[in-house]
Image: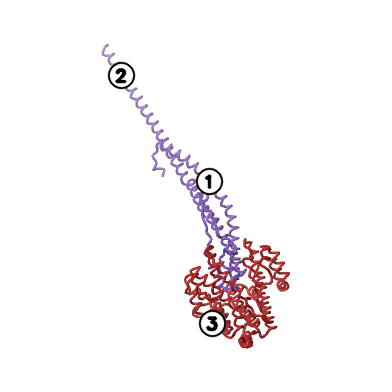
Amino acid sequence: MSTSPGSSNPEYVTTRVRSRRSVLFNDEDYRKLIRMGPAEIARFMEESEYEREINALGARHSGVDLIEYALNRNLAKHFNDLLDWADGRLYDLIARYLRKFDAWNVKTVLRGIYSEADSADVETDLIRAGEMDDRLLDRLLDAGSIEEVIDLLDRTTFADPLRAALEEYEETGVLVPLENAVDRVFYEQLLSDLPGGEANQTYREFLEAEIDFRNARNALRLARSGADIDPSEYYIEGGQLFGASQLSAIGGNVEELVAVIRDSTYGDDLDSALDEFEAADSLISFERALDVALLEYSDRLGFIHPLSVAPIVSYILAKEREVDNIRAIARGREAGLSEEEIEEELVIL
Amino acid sequence: MAEDVKPTRKNLMAIEDRIELSERGHDTLEQKRDGLIMEFMDILDQAQDIREDLDANYETAQRKINMARAMEGDVAVRGAAAALKEHPEITTQSKNIMGVVVPQIESSRVRKSLDQRGYGLLGSSARIDEAADAYEELLESIILAAEVETAMKKMLTEIETTKRRVNALEFKLLPDLHENKEYIEQKLEEQEREEIFRLKKIKAKKEEEESEAAATEAESELEVVEVGD
């Protein structure tokens, strides 16, 4: 996958990723976890990959919060390792995907300032898995105003769009323009300056699928909410499923949106989820189907191009899914959900 | 109590006036009590329906937020909640139901569209939307329940008060007044009887004195005649 030999090391990183992937929880582990209470889950995690994080955070947190923070910290550690191992072009390909955590952290800091939350509370909510280093994140935590945060982000891709959205934020008084600007930057930089080559073409397809799925879920959410918002305002460029003008023309017509998705290349994968969405008028199962489809797609790409960024991205998604699944089990048990209900919510391939 | 009242005609008239007023008040209060009970029964039906809706909405909202916390993470849900600045507002007015002032609660900015919730659409999920929807619906039910249940409690207090007043009139005040009236009437009758008896006595005494005086006069006339002979 490397376009400039010597500057990229996909063989090394994919080998290490394969070993990391082998220690991810399997079906049997999930089956055990579903039958456990939060304390047992924490104990189970203590004897697994998550030992260090559970021990480090055990004194400060307890119960499901401990599990969630340990999961986030472990996720950050693994993804930081990926960035440490990768060189050259591969680093760029991985980093552009992991910038979603930078986007998450920027939004978390902005929300903290907006709601005047304590910086210690905001700090626990950060997931240090992106490209931003600890020093920058700590300085962001110390920032006292949104303008200061934007100034600190000057050398990142987030600064200019945030600055552009600042005026609208000041007019409306809600964080929506800033949050959308941050998310839009993340999605738009995914495909910008993506190098050529066969393996990169499949990576491009995967990223386009991610953007398409995000556009599809947002368009359906907007249509279902009945809000008087032009869906093209939230459209992310780069996908193949809709065009901005097509979305504007469809407006809030749910049936038409569903028909467009059914007729697309994703139609076969999402058919049953769309049926369920139309029957129950709930997007949750549809979103789960999108997650499953993306996970399967990344797995498939990983098999087709084993020495490219594809298996690495596939691992990133699988690791995120593991974290989501364990958190879902722990929170579900805490909330008193039945084993069947939790099992239904998990995404296991 | 009856002994405390002076048995005078003036008091009797005052008591009769009070009895009349109290009986009128008693009838009015009874009507008010019955009217309040009817209104209360209507509100009770409404309150039961609202309470059922509230319970159902609470269950749904809890379920949805638990699901959102489970699938999106507590951090994401808290983050989305922190993004909200436009908090719902309520204003209270009052309306009058049969003399009972009950609140009328108007709410605004409870239901929000996706762009008013503060969190970005691009980075959030339908689970958070559904949890927010469910909580907005729950909040509306809570406000409605607060209005109806406060009205119900106020009506209940008023019914109790009215009932106590009706009972006080029926079992305490009116019997006391009637007793007083009876006492004064008896006393007055007694006084009248005494007066008649006294008058009769005086009359009899007077008649006796008169007859005595006539006899004395007749005797003296007889003596004068005898001396003259």
Badge 2 or badge 1: first in the primary sequence: 1
Tell me, yes or no, whether dots 3 and 1 are on the same chain.
no
Outermost residue on the top side: it is: B229
B196 vs A191: above or below = above
Judge by depth and name the residue closer to the eye, B10 or B123: B123
Secondary structure category for the residue under label 1 = helix
Cα separation between marks 3 and 2: 142 Å
| Residue identified by numbered label 1 | B30
Quarter of the picture containing the C terminus of chain B is top left
Q: Can residue A197 be seen in this view?
A: yes
Q: How many residues crowd around disc 2 within 10 Å: few (fewer than 14), some, or many (20 or more)? A: few
Display coloring: by chain
Would you say B191 lies left or right of A201 here? left
Q: State the residue position of label 2.
A: B217
Q: Where is residue B9 in the image (x, y as percent from the top left)?
A: 41, 35
User: Residue A12: x, y in percent?
Assistant: 62, 88
Residue type at the position of mark 2: Glu
Please, what is the three-letter code of the amino acid marked with disc 3? Answer: Glu
Quick one: which chain is purple? B
Badge 2: chain ID: B
Q: Which residue is drawn at 56% across and 66% down?
A: B118
Placement of the N terminus of chain B among the 4 image quadrants? top left
Decide: marks 3, 2 in contact (CB < 8 A)?
no
Residue under numbered circle 3: A53
Depicted A162 relative to depicted A72: above or below: above
Q: Mark 3 falls within which chain?
A: A
